[in-house]
Amino acid sequence: MSDFLASLHPAIVCLLVCAAKIVEITIQSLKTCMMVKGQRLKAAGLGLLECTIWGLVISTIIGTLGDNLLLLLFYCIGYATGLFLGSTIENKIALGTSSLELIANEESTKKITAYLKEQSRGYTVFEGHGSTDRMNMIFIVLPRKETPRTLKEIRKLCDNKVFVVASEVSKYAGGYGMVK
């Protein structure tokens, strides 16, 4: 491998190292998210691929690090770009489950629960009191991928007059209307 890389122009080697590092760190980011979300088998497969790429990249730069600081720069650029790309991809595929806590008045609560029933989505309503009025908290657990669409619809139904807290759920069991 080192003979092949030595035959290439140094700029090409820098670009190859950068590209490989981008792929490796993107895989690393996705692997970490999958481990946290309990997808251990997929994470292990990505870990194997990540480690293979890392071994090839590090063996390429370790011997020339003192002689070629440009190679180190491209390694670092690839690392940073891979982190950004990995988190962007994970955000798009939206692994996991979200919890929504909505605080709304009685009128908005009726609109929200009608929408959730129409969507066959489970929810729980807690009655409470705000600083000036009677309010309800609506608790929903749903796949993270559905969260943006659901929030958009709820905000539209309530003319943005709903307070929302969204968070990630690591584990849950049971529940009505849950997608497993």
Image: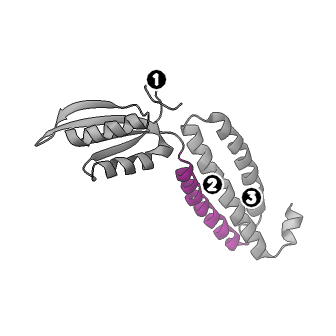
First along the sequence among labels 1 and 2: 2
- The image position of residue 54, as x and y in percent, is 72, 53
The 10 Å Cα crowd at callout 3, few under 14, some 14 to 19, many 20 or more, is some
Magenta span has 170?
Answer: no
Under circle 2, the secondary element is helix
Look at the numbered discs 3 and 2 and tell me whether their residues touch, using CB distance below 8 Å.
no
User: Residue 25 versus residue 180: which sits nearer the camera?
Assistant: 180
User: Residue 41 versus residue 128: which sits nearer the camera?
Assistant: 128
User: Which image quarter holds the N terminus?
Assistant: bottom right
Residue on which disc 1 sits? 174
Magenta span has 71?
Answer: yes
Query: What amino acid type is highlighted by mark number 2?
Result: Thr
68 vs 175, left or right, is: right
Query: What amino acid type is highlighted by mark number 1?
Result: Gly
First along the sequence among labels 3 and 1: 3
Res 101 label: none
First along the sequence among labels 3 and 2: 2
Residue drawn at x 63%, y 34% is 40
What residue span does the magenta drawing correspond to? 66-94
Look at the image and tell me whether residue 86 can be seen.
yes
Res 26 label: 2
- The image position of residue 113, as x and y in percent, is 32, 36
- The image position of residue 62, as x and y in percent, is 74, 61
Residue drawn at x 59%, y 59% is 85
The 10 Å Cα crowd at callout 1, few under 14, some 14 to 19, many 20 or more, is few
The 10 Å Cα crowd at callout 2, few under 14, some 14 to 19, many 20 or more, is many
Q: Is residue 175 above or below residue 36?
A: above
Q: Is residue 176 above or below residue 84?
A: above
Residue on which disc 3 sits? 57
